[in-house]
Image (cartoon, helix red, strand yellow):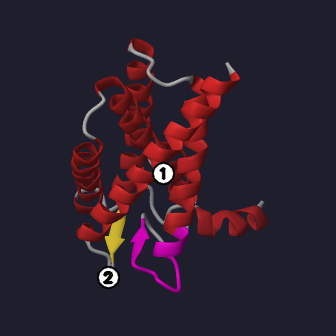
Amino acid sequence: MTNISKILEPLTPKTFDENEIFVLSIVVLCVCILALVHHLEPHLLQTEIIALFVFNILLGTIGDRMLAEPPLDFYDTLDYGHGEFFDSILQIVVYPIPIILFIHFYRKWKPNKIVYILLYGFFLVGLEWISAEYFDVFQFKTWKTSYSYVFYCCVLTVNLIFAGQIKKYLSRGM
């Protein structure tokens, strides 16, 4: 049993504190909001939601690995300078849901794309700032919030294109 503990040690939090509690809380909140919004007015097919989940898990994982680990090493997440179990929870559950909601509300309201991307980018930066400032989820080294804004606007743009392509593909098959 001690061999398993040693193997898992780098993946477990140093201490179970505010950032792990925040991650678990935000997981419950995000899942509940997505379930409620989708139940009340489904503007996305379940196939689209799954595709967006997988796409954004990929983007979040690659983004965090490239930006938060050497050689760039712009920031740390949670308790370590490398990935841990709660990083995976963030990447698999928390990162994709705000993007899926972004696509959902885009389809519902049909706003101006550029204005919507710019405003939602501020929303995502605000969520990041709260998680970094109050819950120590991110510890920025050379990373700045303004970089996050540009990054989020790019991710939102790519997601709108991806969601549009998925919708076209699915409508051809039906």
Residue 37 percent location from the top left of the image: 38, 21
Q: Say what secondary structure mark 1 lies in.
A: helix
Q: Amino acid at mark 2?
A: Thr
Q: Amino acid at mark 1?
A: Leu
Residue at screen point 72% across, 68% down: 7
Magenta part of the chain: 65-77
Q: Say what secondary structure mark 2 lies in.
A: loop
Outermost top residue = 40
The mark found on residue 90 in the picture is 1
Residue at screen point 39% across, 15% down: 41
Residue 91 percent location from the top left of the image: 52, 52
Which of the 4 image quarters holds residue 19? Answer: bottom left
For the question of whether residue 1 can be seen, the reply is: yes
Q: Is residue 87 above or below residue 145?
A: above
Between the C-alphas of marks 2 and 1, the distance is 21 Å
Residue at screen point 27% across, 46% down: 120
For the question of whether residue 82 can be seen, the reply is: no
- The N terminus, quarter of image: bottom right
Q: Earlier in the sequence, mark 2 or mark 1?
A: 1
Residue 145 percent location from the top left of the image: 25, 67
Label 1 environment density (alpha carbons within 10 Å; few <14, some 14–19, many ≥20): some
Between 31 and 120, the one lying in front of the other is 120
Mark 2 sits on what residue? Answer: 142
Label 2 environment density (alpha carbons within 10 Å; few <14, some 14–19, many ≥20): few
Between 122 and 141, the one lying in front of the other is 122
- The C terminus, quarter of image: top right
Residue 8 percent location from the top left of the image: 67, 63
